[in-house]
Image (spheres, rainbow, N blue to C red):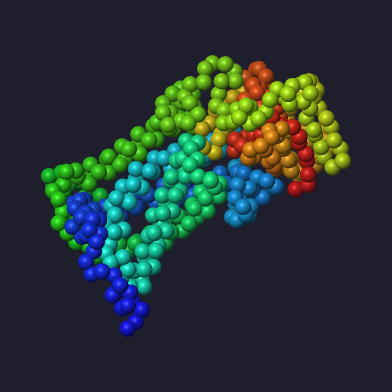
């Protein structure tokens, strides 16, 4: 008796009650065409999610010191950086697409899982070695998509019901999911072609409720053996899914676009109305929660600016006496929100020249914040050289508030929000 035969003897002939029984799933809409169509809709969205996610990852310049968000800094070497010559809102666009598209795809992902749910409960679960591999691949695909969307949505809402690094699980989980998705699509491509060849690409969407019929029986068991009468047409189902995606998009996209549309961002975790004061815009971390008090930001505060053995100590008054540059720049958080403000401060390039650092040197910035992530970041030479890259002292014509980084903060075009370090205490230029 071979291993497969012995394994079959251990599996009960009759399926357990509930969702494992063939007659349990009775929707007349399920079938190869519906699943293929939903999968086809997902493909461009998933590819765009991967691309914008990678751009976000690379925007951290992970090979520079402590910037890496994952344990292995060069796990995927950066292939592209948003040019500093581009508008300062370029990261807002790419990250806004990543977050808003991810939220909008949730109804479509759920619909796709619903369309294949009989397959997930197929009995017996394992009929052959090939079936075992397929079941394992489905397990990886379904579990990884749930992990990716759950962690992504939770992070966008600043809810962290876990004890691990979001960046690590989301980044490596994305590669697991995308690999499983690509493999699954390649395996199912013949099924997709057959479904479109048999039923047409859009023809089933012409049927209203009265003319909605079950698809022909399929070997994967998606078509119900004893289907119920339809209560919604396939185009009605897709309209419901599309409407859900559109609704989710509309109640969040204002957080990325800003301006008057921010009031429509019902899902915005950082609020919709901020008053009219110069410092009334989004705050991820307040001075109190960061442990930054007036005792360390008062008159005794000084900026330590260093290159090699050359160290300069500058008070805020001395920084204010230097040539001031004004720039309208967009600040974007990885969670998807953006805000555009008018900043005033000293160019980072001027500070580099003050200590005689080279144009090819990396700038390491440290905050006086006593604890928390991203207290130390590194800025690439091209970021330092940007004409609008500032050590900001004022915003919208007034001093920075404590919550926005008083006495000084970094603001760099196109950099992730966490790299616009608040409460700067020291800056050191080092060889790249």
Extreme residue in the bottom direction: 1
* Residue 364, quarter of picture: top right
* Residue 301, quarter of picture: top right
Using residue 223 as the reference point, say whether residue 48 is left or right of it: right
Residue 109 position, x and y percent, is 36, 47
Residue 388 position, x and y percent, is 67, 31
Residue ID at (78%, 36%): 352
Using residue 361 as the reference point, say whether residue 120 is left or right of it: left
Looking at the picture, does residue 369 appear above or below residue 226? Answer: above
Residue ID at (76%, 36%): 427
Using residue 79 as the reference point, say whether residue 126 is left or right of it: left
Using residue 50 as the reference point, say whether residue 431 is left or right of it: right
**Residue 388 visible to the viewer:** no
Q: Which residue is nearer to you in this view: 213 or 172? A: 172
Q: Which residue is nearer to you in this view: 103 or 136? A: 136
Residue 3 position, x and y percent, is 36, 79
Residue ID at (72%, 37%): 366
Looking at the picture, does residue 284 appear above or below residue 19? Answer: above
Q: Which residue is nearer to you in this view: 294 or 392? A: 294
Count of marks, rendered view: 0
Residue 394 position, x and y percent, is 67, 22
């Amino acid at each position: 008796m071979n291993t497969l035969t012995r394994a079959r003897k251990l599996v009960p002939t009759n399926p357990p009650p509930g969702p494992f029984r063939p007659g349990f799933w009775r929707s007349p809409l399920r079938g190869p065409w519906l699943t293929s169509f939903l999968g086809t809709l997902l493909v461009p969205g998933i590819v765009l999610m991967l691309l914008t996610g990678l751009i976000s990852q690379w925007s951290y310049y992970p090979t520079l010191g402590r910037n890496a968000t994952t344990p292995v800094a060069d796990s995927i070497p950066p292939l592209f950086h948003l040019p500093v010559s581009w508008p300062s809102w370029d990261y807002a666009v790419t990250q806004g697409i990543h977050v808003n598209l991810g939220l909008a795809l949730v109804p479509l992902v759920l619909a796709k899982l619903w369309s294949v749910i009989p397959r997930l409960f197929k009995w017996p679960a394992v009929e052959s070695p090939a079936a075992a591999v397929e079941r394992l691949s489905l397990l990886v695909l379904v579990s990884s998509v749930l992990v990716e969307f759950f962690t992504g949505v939770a992070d966008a809402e600043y809810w962290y019901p876990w004890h691990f690094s979001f960046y690590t699980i989301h980044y490596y989980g994305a590669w697991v999911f995308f690999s499983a998705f690509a493999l699954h699509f390649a395996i199912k491509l013949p099924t997709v072609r057959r479904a479109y060849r048999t039923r047409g690409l859009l023809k089933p969407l012409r049927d209203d409720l009265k003319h909605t019929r079950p698809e022909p029986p399929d070997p994967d068991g998606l078509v119900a053996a004893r289907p119920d009468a339809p209560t919604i047409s396939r185009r009605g189902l897709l309209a419901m899914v599309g409407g859900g995606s559109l609704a989710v998009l509309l109640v969040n996209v204002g957080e990325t676009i800003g301006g008057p549309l921010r009031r429509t961002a019902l899902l915005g975790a950082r609020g919709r109305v901020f008053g009219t004061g110069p410092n009334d815009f989004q705050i991820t971390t307040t001075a109190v929660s960061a442990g930054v008090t007036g005792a360390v930001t008062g008159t005794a505060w000084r900026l330590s600016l260093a290159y090699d053995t050359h160290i300069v100590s500058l008070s805020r008054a001395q920084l204010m006496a230097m040539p001031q540059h004004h720039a309208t720049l967009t600040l974007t958080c990885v969670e998807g929100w953006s805000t555009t403000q008018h900043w005033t401060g000293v160019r980072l390039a001027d500070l580099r020249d003050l200590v005689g650092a080279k144009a090819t040197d990396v700038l390491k910035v440290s905050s006086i914040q006593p604890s928390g992530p991203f207290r130390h970041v590194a800025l690439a030479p091209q970021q330092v050289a940007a004409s609008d890259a500032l050590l900001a002292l004022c915003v919208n014509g007034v001093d920075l508030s404590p919550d926005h980084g008083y006495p000084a903060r970094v603001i760099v075009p196109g950099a992730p929000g966490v790299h616009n370090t608040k409460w700067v205490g020291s800056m050191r230029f080092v060889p790249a």
